[in-house]
Image (cartoon, rainbow, N blue to C red):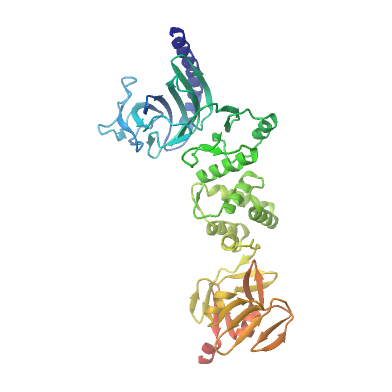
Amino acid sequence: MKFAISFFVVLVSTISALLFMQFQVYSNQIDLEDSAFNYSQEIEIVYRGESLDIRQHFKNLPNEDVTIVWPSKAENPNCFIETEYSCSRLSEDLTTFNSGENRTQSLSYIIPLKGGLKSNQLMEDLFIKLKNGTVKFSTVHISTDSEIGGQWVTGLPLIGQQSLSLVNYSMFSGEGEVRDLYWKAGNLALQQATNTISVYAKNPTSIAFNEKLAKLKLLNDEHIAIVEGENNSDSQGKRILFLPQITTKQIQQSVIFAQLNAMYDFVDTPRWLKEVVASYLTGSTLGGERATTIVQTLTNQMTDEQLQKWLDELRALQGKEVTPSKLDEVLSTVFGIHTSYFSLNANSKEIFPFLFNDKRDVYIDEEKQNTVDVIFKEGLVLYSAQDLLNGLGYEATKGQNGYYVENATRAFRFPNEPGFYVFNQRRYNTISEPIVQVAGQYYIEESWLQRLFLVEIQKTEQNINLITAEVQQEK
């Protein structure tokens, strides 16, 4: 038993010495960075029956007041006296590190685990956070009784683990924050690791898999753990992802989407839009048919300079809200002319073609039409038919034999086949088409709008004004 304890002490000391050297180099880099508030941390976790006893050490703290955000489940929050200065900055109510010269402070607390440690369960909201602070480097030590066998996962790279006569010990260390903790009983093990990905599975991964894993294109270098299987909570962690079956394609897509969600604030955006953003940021084609088509379409429309500007604008959106309309705004800046390409595709079942839009407001007899779109296609100016014709006092419907537009005295039918239209039961042949479909939606061509529906069109820099025959007569 003495030998086991001695071996454990030597193991921890050796790893800690190596880590200390790495940490010192990293600390110097942090000091050089021009940022408001970066810090590093070391977390010691000991599992005791039905709780996790946690000691959290904060390093490189700024000389200013720092608000402490305790985990919602934390019990017995307290100072951890490691040295005489470990809690010199801690306020009496345990909510703040007051300003001071000492850059290292330590806290302790307990996270209760009702029913004890459960296998295959993701544990979240375990660790203290410092308000307005960014964790640049984390080290995690986890100890359990030797009778408890299994695999810990944190999302950080696994530095080492050892099973001794009295204790099982695991150590993780790497850049960034520790957000989740996962434990699995049984034979789950680290099978393969790169600088950015650790793969935990029951069985060893193949040589071909490992080679492909090393070549995956991702969005950043923040390490993430992939666990084969599903967790009990049916949720994914921030840096721990669960896949029923592990393939490099699934890993790439899962990791990239996790990175995207961390980098951007996507608001009510369809999956294909995220796939488009990911494809451009990684320089590879990701996603389904809609995303692939949109990426190819946009890329073909852009010059090299426009493509670079588009990539720069996408990167500049990090940390901000991303919506179809926001991407339209950025895309319009790139092309120098307005487009609603993303918004139209978000509202269309079919893949909407790339078109430019007339962004001027549309009015009918001085009443603004908020839902009428004006697009340019093959030299034609097209107005979205349904809302526009409704605004002109017509009822427009799609029927078996074409598109029907009617009011009390005038009735049109625009057939599915080209070459003619019907007005008040009389057929008229045409060379061009009054009504066309774009991605399943009906549009009316501008000159036909004037001719058939008796409107005068007046355009200013801000507005498109449609004046009906009745108003023209009044004037």
Residue nearest the viewer, comparing 213 with 367: 213
- Residue 422 visible in the current orientation: yes
Residue 177 visible somewhere in the drawing: no
Quadrant location of residue 223?
A: top right
Q: Is residue 1 above or below residue 327?
A: above
Q: Residue furthest top?
A: 2
Judge from the rendering whether residue 206 lies leftward or rightward of residue 277; answer left or right: right
Which residue extends farthest left?
92
Residue located at (62% from left, 73% from top): 442
On the image, the x and y values in percent for residue 169 come to 47, 20
Residue 249 at what x, y percent from top left? 64, 41
In the image shown, does 354 or 291 lie closer to the viewer? 291
Q: Residue at x 67, y 33 (%)?
A: 209
Q: What x and y, as percent, mark residue 161? A: 51, 21
The N terminus lies in which quarter of the figure?
Answer: top left
* Residue 355 left/right relative to 236: right
Looking at the image, which residue sits at the far bottom?
473
Q: Quadrant of residue 282?
A: top right
- Total residue callouts: 0
Picture layout, residue 421 above or below residue 16: below
Please name whichever residue, 308 or 421, is drawn nearer the observer in this view of the structure: 421
